[in-house]
Image: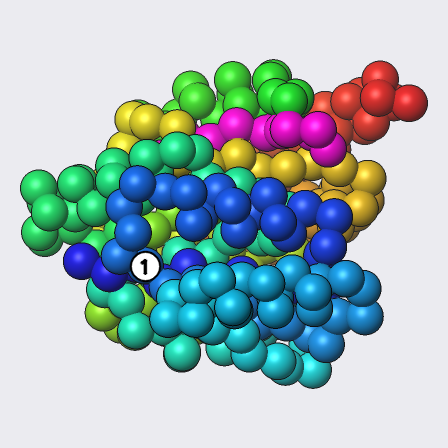
């Protein structure tokens, strides 16, 4: 079973090597990496050349003019030749043995179409941070409740792995959304078939000052609220609105504590 890992990049030199190392150091080696770069102007190009020379059969590089992260992800998905697809931001990292665990679950449950696992938030140096966010999400991981997901996105994006055939069925990520097209995709995919939950840590999402979701957390949270409207009944609006502002308040507190 082959995995295709898509990495959208633009001037990502700071964390890119850590990201790629977390992939190429996996014990399960039947995978390809597809980097979709928006013509980076930093030292990312040097890193690309290094990996192209070291892993010419498993490292692929495509260039596309900047049209947003999700456009790059869709491009990578079209190029993917694996049985299972996933995307990883260039500042995130996979946990050791992540691929082994994912493939084992898909082999054990051949009817499964997609899955998500446990994920932590890490800081610039790779240390766990924002433990309260992880703790809140962990309350809902094992329940796999679609109704709760409509109110709160508890799925950690880099822990999601999807069968390519299922991705083709569900369709592309909606590029009309700048921050939360992944959230919209989970809601859309769930309507077709619920995911499995893998009770193992699979990946770490990095929060740092350059993260779009850190800089624009208010706009991102409001976009998530707009997405929820399209997947839920009118009577859920008040609950969603309250959760939206609670999340904004929580991020505001954490941001001020960090300063």
Residue 104 % position (x, y): 16, 41
| For residue 38, above or below residue 88 | below
Q: Residue at x 82, y 27 (%)?
A: 255
**Which secondary structure type mostly characterizes the magenta part of the structure?**
strand
Q: In this view, does 135 lie to the left or right of 210?
A: left
The residue under the point 55% across, 78% down is 62
Quadrant of the image occupied by residue 40: bottom right
The colour scheme used to paint the residues is rainbow
Q: Does the magenta stretch include residue 85?
A: no
Quarter of the image with the C terminus is top right
Asked whether, in this view, residue 111 is left or right of residue 243, the answer is left
Report the quarter where the N terminus lies.
bottom left
The part of the chain drawn in magenta is 117-126
As displayed, is residue 84 above or below residue 224?
Answer: below
Rendered location of residue 55, percent (x, y): 44, 64
> Does residue 151 appear in this view?
no
The single residue placed furthest to the right in the displayed view is: 259
Along the line of sight, which residue is nearer the eye, 3 or 196? 3
- Crowding near the residue tagged with mark 1, few <14, some 14–19, many ≥20 C-alpha atoms within 10 Å: many
Name which residue lies at 84% across and 17% down.
Answer: 257
- Total labels drawn: 1
Residue at the image point whose x is 80% and y is 46% from the top: 210
Q: Position of residue 199 (x, y in %)?
A: 29, 26
Residue pointed to by mark 1: 31
- In this view, the residue in front, 51 or 14, is 51
Asked which secondary structure carries label 1, the reply is strand
Residue 20 appears in the figure: yes
């Amino acid at each position: 079973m082959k995995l295709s890992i898509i990495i959208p990049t633009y001037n990502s030199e700071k964390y890119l090597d850590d990201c790629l190392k977390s992939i190429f150091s996996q014990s399960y080696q039947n995978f390809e990496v597809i980097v979709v770069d928006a013509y980076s102007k930093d030292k990312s190009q040097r890193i690309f050349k290094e990996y192209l020379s070291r892993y010419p059969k498993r490292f692929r590089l495509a260039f596309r003019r900047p049209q947003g992260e999700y456009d790059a992800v869709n491009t990578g998905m079209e190029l993917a030749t694996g049985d299972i697809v996933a995307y990883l931001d260039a500042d995130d990292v996979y946990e050791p043995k992540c691929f082994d665990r994912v493939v084992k679950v898909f082999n054990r449950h051949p009817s499964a179409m997609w899955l998500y696992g446990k994920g932590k938030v890490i800081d610039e140096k790779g240390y766990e941070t924002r433990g309260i966010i992880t703790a809140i999400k962990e309350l809902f991981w094992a329940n796999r409740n679609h109704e709760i997901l409509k109110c709160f996105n508890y799925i950690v994006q880099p822990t999601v792995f999807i069968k390519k055939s299922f991705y083709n069925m569900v369709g592309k990520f909606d590029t009309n959304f700048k921050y939360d097209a992944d959230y919209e995709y989970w809601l859309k995919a769930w309507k077709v078939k619920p995911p499995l939950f893998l009770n193992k840590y699979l990946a770490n999402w990095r929060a740092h000052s350059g993260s779009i979701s850190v800089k624009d957390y208010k706009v991102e949270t409001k976009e998530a609220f707009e997405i929820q409207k399209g997947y839920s009944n009118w009577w859920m609006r008040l609950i969603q609105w309250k959760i939206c502002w609670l999340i904004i308040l929580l991020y505001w507190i954490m941001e001020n504590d960090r300063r």
